[in-house]
Amino acid sequence: MTNMKQAIESGDLSRVQALLTEHPERARELISFGPNNQHQVPPLHYVCNVVFRKLVTQEQALDMAQALIEAGVDIDDAYAKSGDTYLIAAASLGADRVGVHLVEVGADIHAKGLFGATALHWTAMLGLPKLASALLAAGARTDLPDVKYKSTPLEWAQYAWLKGTNGHREGIPEVARLLGGSVVSQHK
């Protein structure tokens, strides 16, 4: 029998939905993963994680995220000790379709998580212009510095451009433009 972790990793929407129908509480049960299963996150975060690991497509992740939200997941739950929310997870793990959907259904765009960073900071770092557009259209602030580096989202984009990113480097210039700046520098 397939469990929630396996269903998410394989992008099996019908199995995710069946598991949620059988036991709606599975929408919030922690999933263990990583070396020695040291990480534990709720299923909606795990959906974003499998996008980052390229196990599922953006579309599969969006469908599974919608199923979890329909099952009653609180989209603004700050489930991590850092304060991270599902929107921050989507942004920091490159699940931009999930992130855009979360913005559309009213997720808190100003929540601060790890480093006191918002979803817009992570979106800038990972070069996700569609999510950046959605966040900005919803009123995300571009002037808020994080608490660790004292940097704005634009400065996160500039850093990622110069130092590299685990995201989509090709999207960083567009995100920077949306944020009202540039990533061009003499340090190409």
Image (cartoon, rainbow, N blue to C red):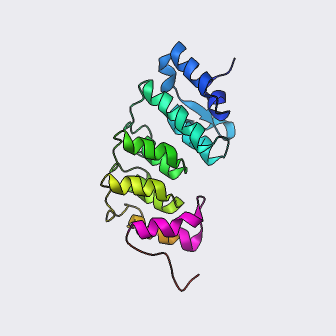
Q: Is residue 39 visible?
A: no
Left-right relation of 93 to 139: right
Towards the viewer: 44 or 64: 64
Q: Which percent across, then down, holds residue 188?
A: 59, 81
**Residue sitting at x 43%, y 57%:** 132
Q: Is residue 120 above or below residue 149?
A: above
Residue visible at 45% across and 23% down in the picture: 71
What type of secondary structure mainly makes up the magenta span?
Answer: helix
Which image quadrant for residue 176? Answer: bottom left
First to last magenta residue range: 160-179
List x then y, in percent, for residue 183. Answer: 49, 75
- Image point (38%, 36%), residue name: 77
60 relative position to 151: left or right: right
Q: Quadrant of the N terminus?
A: top right
Tell me if residue 174 is in the magenta stretch: yes
- Residue 46 percent across, percent down from the top left: 56, 37
Question: Can you name the residue that lies furthest to the top here?
Answer: 22
Above-or-below relation of 85 to 172: above
Q: Is residue 168 left or right of residue 147?
A: right
Residue at the spot x=42%, y=52% of the render? 119
